[in-house]
Amino acid sequence: MADTPLPDDLIELQQRLHQARAEYTALCRSLPWSVEPLDGRPGAVHPHTGEVTGGRDASPGCTPEQEAEEKRLWELARELSIAVSTHPYWGTLEKDAGLVKARMELKRHSKAQPDAVSVPGGAGAT
């Protein structure tokens, strides 16, 4: 554990970063497999079992709204990553194992988890 308590604003930034990454991951999982519309391809039929493996359905491509949301969430996660990693608090610690412990403490802090609190103006705000 760090000798000095983690600043509240740093904990909030980390929470917002976790939330932005979770939203980005969820969005990417919901998107079509191709950004642009593409034809699918048939799978391969196993010669002995007849099981079809591989292949892909056609992709309708992403909508402009989906592309804009992906870009927005990516930029938000990038900006929050920078804000967390360059926070002035890190400069107050010795450059040793204590710094690593403090960083791990922040990442795992109960208040810094994406579902810990709702942050007004955070990743989910529009």
Image: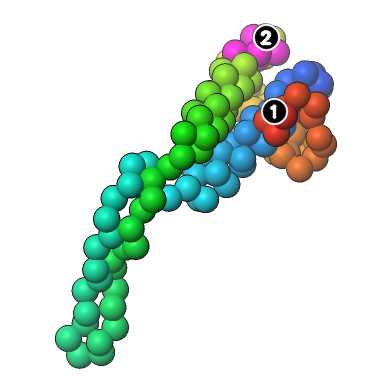
**Residue 106 visible in rendering:** no
Residue 76 point in image, percent of width and height: 58, 24
Is 21 placed left or right of 38 in the picture?
Answer: right
Instruction: Tell me the crowding category of disc 2: few under 14, some 14 to 19, or many 20 or more residues within 10 angstroms, Cα based.
Output: few
Q: Quote the CA–CA distance across marks 1 and 2.
A: 28 Å
Q: Against 75, is 86 above or below?
A: above
Q: Against 105, is 50 above or below?
A: below
In magenta stretch: residue 87: yes
Pick whichever, 108 or 22, lies toward us. Answer: 22
- Compare marks 1 and 2 and give the one earlier in the sequence: 2
Label 1's element?
Answer: loop
Instruction: Tell me the crowding category of disc 1: few under 14, some 14 to 19, or many 20 or more residues within 10 angstroms, Cα based.
Output: few
Which colour scheme appears in the figure? Answer: rainbow
Residue 10 point in image, percent of width and height: 73, 20
Residue 42 point in image, percent of width and height: 24, 68
Instruction: Assign the magenta stretch its main secondary structure.
Output: helix
Quadrant (top left, top right, bottom left, bottom right) of the C terminus: top right
The residue segment tinted magenta is 86-91
Q: At 50% from the left edge and 30% from the top edge, which residue is drawn?
A: 68
**Residue 59 visible in rendering:** yes
Q: Against 93, is 52 above or below?
A: below
* Identity, as a three-letter code, of the amino acid under mark 2: Pro
Image disc number at residue 88: 2
| Quadrant of res 19 | top right
Residue at mark 1: 126
Judged by depth in the image, the label closer to the viewer, 1 or 2, is 1
In magenta stretch: residue 74: no
